[in-house]
Image: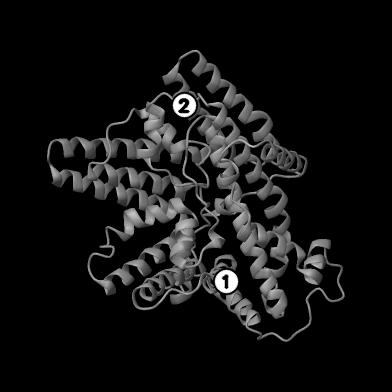
Amino acid sequence: MLFNSYEFLLLFLPLTLSGIYLLTWGKQTKCTIWFAAFASLIFYASGEKYIVFILLESVIFNYLVGSAILQWQEKKNQRYANILLLIGITANLGLLGYFKYTNFFAANLENAFGWHLGIPPIALPIGISFYTFTQIGFLVDSWRGESHRYRISDYLLFVTYFPHLVAGPILNHKKIIPQFEQNRFGRPSAEALYKAAIFFSVGMFKKIIIADNLAGYVHIFFDHPDQLNIIESWMAALLYALQLYYDFSGYSEMAVGLSLLMNIEIPINFNSPYKSASIVEFWRRWHISLSLFLRDYIYIPLGGNRKGEARRYFNLVLTMFLGGLWHGAGWTFILWGTLHGCGLAINHMWQRFARPLPRVVALPFTFIFVIFGWVLFRSPNLHAAGQLFSAMLGGHAIPNIFHGADPSSLVHHVSSSLCWIALLLLWCFAAPNTQQFAEKPRWYVAVIAACMLAASFMSIDSASDFLYFKF
């Protein structure tokens, strides 16, 4: 089920909110938590059906392992706690690895050694990367003594919570479960409802009106990387950078808005990332929950910056290498993550040994670096990425692929004036972000949000997946 579908907006959401509000009004706190967890499982099962049992088994397993770790920590038996942590992380990574990387490794072995393994395609369960990382964080925090024994209902809702389940943000139990325990769930204030409306409306507009309309034209360009000239290749890269930005930030803002309808604050995942003047700043603004997870559960345990500069740079590259691998089973994702790891290392070296660049220079330089990374991120393979890079650097002196054809109106318009790209970039670079819009009630912001919601609702033709569903 998708946030941008009539099924969700007209059936699931009203019924779920009605049930939560009625149970809360009747002071049935425990029943409210169970009802919301059950509704979240229905939300997931609507798209995954039988694979919902994998999610349930994962939740039960991690809850039991986490509870056992806490028990042995209380008994001061570090050895058993260590063993259980190792078992828990191995099981989680094994589950993720089976569904996400089996076909990738099998294909590479077949190509390298000429084997025929005959492994059938394995479907990737939606959201498995997000709920796996969420629960690994819980296990590690239990081992660190930074958790406590939660009710099974609270933990179940924490993991399956439908606003974040399929595409993030990655939640931290320390910030979410206490909100359930404080009995604030299902009791939104007027301020929370106002913010919910702004976040959801703007996010839906970004997804349906902007990202979905860009998607078709991005496909046209990326499906013919060998036929693009320098202008078309840069247009392709820019359009995808905009599509990904508006698609993922749109989902994340809709998730924040939906959660606020139930009076639960989940993390802001975007903070105008294209306004960044360095790669370090970019990763503090883009996919913030993933950045924090990589920092807290990979970079710092590797040693962080505590073991000298050389080790610090190695840790950065390795962390982002793993971050790239988390995004997808493909060499393009691995190279994209490694590229950003090298960018972070160079950025830190520059901060240590040289003067910072003026922001007017650093901002476009950072954006161009990010765009080159997105080409890898979007390309189906390294060969296609290489062809697009070649075109962007002026290596293709061939006619326009749309010559003699009847291109769509948007591609024709963008090709002739770049007006839409300029307007969308202006929103990214100059406009206040959604959390600034929602800071305090303003009547004109409410009117704009209402118009955005109405335009989005009337533009739902067929619900389209969010880009991060595949990760």
| Camera-side residue of 419 and 119 | 419
How crowded pointer 2 is (Cα within 10 Å; few <14, some 14-19, many 20+) is rated as many
Q: Quadrant of residue 371?
A: bottom right
Q: Which mark is residue 83?
A: none
Which residue is found at the position 69% from the left and 64% from the top? 218
**Where in the figure is residue 99, as x and y percent of width and height?**
46, 53
Instruction: Identify which amino acid the numbered label 1 is placed on.
Output: Pro
Which residue is found at the position 44% from the left and 40% from the top? 55
**Secondary structure of residue under mark 2:** loop
**Where in the figure is residue 50, as x and y percent of width and height?**
52, 38
Q: Please, which residue is most extreme toward the left here?
A: 76
| Camera-side residue of 432 and 422 | 432
**Is residue 214 visible in this depiction of the protein?**
yes
| Camera-side residue of 163 and 367 | 367
- In the image, 174: left or right of 159? left
User: Where does label 1 land, which residue?
Assistant: 364
- In the image, 387: left or right of 315? right
Instruction: Identify which amino acid the numbered label 2 is placed on.
Output: Phe
The N terminus - image quarter: top right
Q: Quadrant of residue 379?
A: bottom right
Q: Which mark is residue 185?
A: 2
Say if 290 sits above or below 185 in the image.
below
Say if 280 sits above or below 41 in the image.
below
Whole-number angstrom distance, CA of label 2 to CA of label 1: 43 Å
How crowded pointer 1 is (Cα within 10 Å; few <14, some 14-19, many 20+) is rated as some
- In the image, 259: left or right of 83? right
**Is residue 464 visible in this depiction of the protein?**
no
Say if 133 sits above or below 62 in the image.
below
